[in-house]
Image (tube, rainbow, N blue to C red):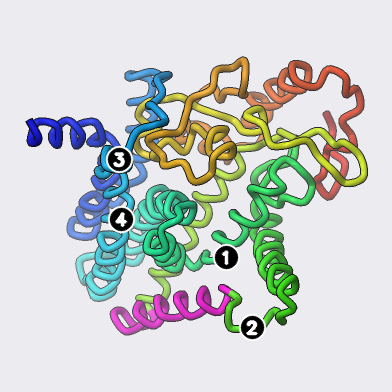
Amino acid sequence: MIAHQDVAKFSAALPFWMSLGLIPLVWIGALWGGLWVLLPIVATWYLFSALDAALGLNLENAELDTSEDELFWYKAITIAWVPLQFVSLFGLIAYVSGATHLNGWEKFGVFFGVGVMTGTVGINYSHELMHQKDKLERWLGDLLLAMVLYSHFRSEHLLVHHRYVGTPRDPVTARYNEGFHRFYPRVLRESLVSAFQAEAAMLARKTLPWHHSTNPFWKFAFLQLVMLLLAFALGGWTGIVLFLVQAGVAIWQLELVNYVEHYGLTRKHLGDGKYEHVLPRHSWNAAHKASNWLLINLQRHSDHHYKPDRRFPLLQNYTEADAPQLPYGYPVMTMAAMVPPLWRRVMNPRVRRWREMYYPEITDWSDYNTSAHPLPR
């Protein structure tokens, strides 16, 4: 009976383990070269888009009183990924740096695929881990972020984004009509600054200077330096370049998702710099089954903002009555975001319907457009 129950628990979690399939795909690209380097890209964006179309939506919700024991195989995915990514990333740096069967473009292609892996899965798993109360899990999350040189994301996400989402104080909330190519350089700059300022403010409340040893930015810098030195030790300057390629791709993937998650959604301003509480309506959601397997339910984003430390298998689905829904899963939507005219054609009417549905009393939205320059309707 015990064995049967264990098998049942593992079987329930098994679809979410599909993400581990990206690891052999990047190795196939490194070993065979040529068009094989495109496998991670084809799998994450196109295969999962096709699976979403074929498998449809998952509108079911897990029981919230599910015990930690029953969640073991879900938790194990995110923990096991950390050493697997570490070995794959640095093993590939050592192998590809000296691979004579790969030309320069093929090496770039391999590490573009590695960035798809460390961004789509690695940063996403770090997001899950950083929200947990267990210190080991939070440390593992820091290691994943250090592998893509984006350690400050933890501070920005926990101290800024969750507090100020949907307001001008959140750099990560994409403004209405703000194209991704304008959003991206802005968020790279502003999120780093806001993360540092948030940590400095926390220290100031304890009457400590920003450079105090407890500022996590020191740990961030140390971990990232270790990663860079390891890349150099294994692959020389070529290893550094390859490491930077994957980190850049991973960061780009993260910010594409950030762009999609809250585009054009704003919390109502109550006056005196105060805004309404964060509600399910302030995040875009997608119930597409396959991409939620790949992204461990990240697309159930409204519930994540409602209960940030809730483990991913327990995140609840919201209907259109409570939260805005994306027409497709993140793989399709992030591709659309790269083409601003297409993105605006798809999403701007949905933002306007959202405004009419939830805030019919607001007739002038000009004050809610927080981008640097006035934008047309």
Three-letter amino acid code at the position of disc 1: His
Question: How many angstroms separate mark 1 from mark 4 (CA)?
Answer: 20 Å
Instruction: Report x, y in % for residue 53.
Output: 38, 20
Three-letter amino acid code at the position of disc 2: His
Q: Are marks 1 and 2 in contact (CB under 8 Å)?
A: no
What residue would you read off at disc 4?
79
Residue drawn where x is 26% and y is 44% of the image: 72
Residue drawn where x is 64% and y is 47% of the image: 162
Q: Nearer the viewer, mark 4 or mark 2?
A: 2
- Is residue 109 visible from the viewing direction of this image? yes
Q: Nearer the viewer, mark 1 or mark 2?
A: 2
The magenta segment: 216-237
**As displayed, is residue 163 above or below residue 2?**
below
What residue would you read off at disc 2?
212
What residue would you read off at disc 1?
152
Position of the C terminus by quadrant: top right
Question: How many angstroms separate mark 3 from mark 2 (CA)?
Answer: 38 Å
Instruction: Report x, y in % for residue 348.
Output: 71, 26
Q: Are marks 3 and 2 in contact (CB under 8 Å)?
A: no
What residue would you read off at disc 3?
71
Q: Nearer the viewer, residue 363 or 63?
A: 63
- Is residue 245 visible from the viewing direction of this image? no
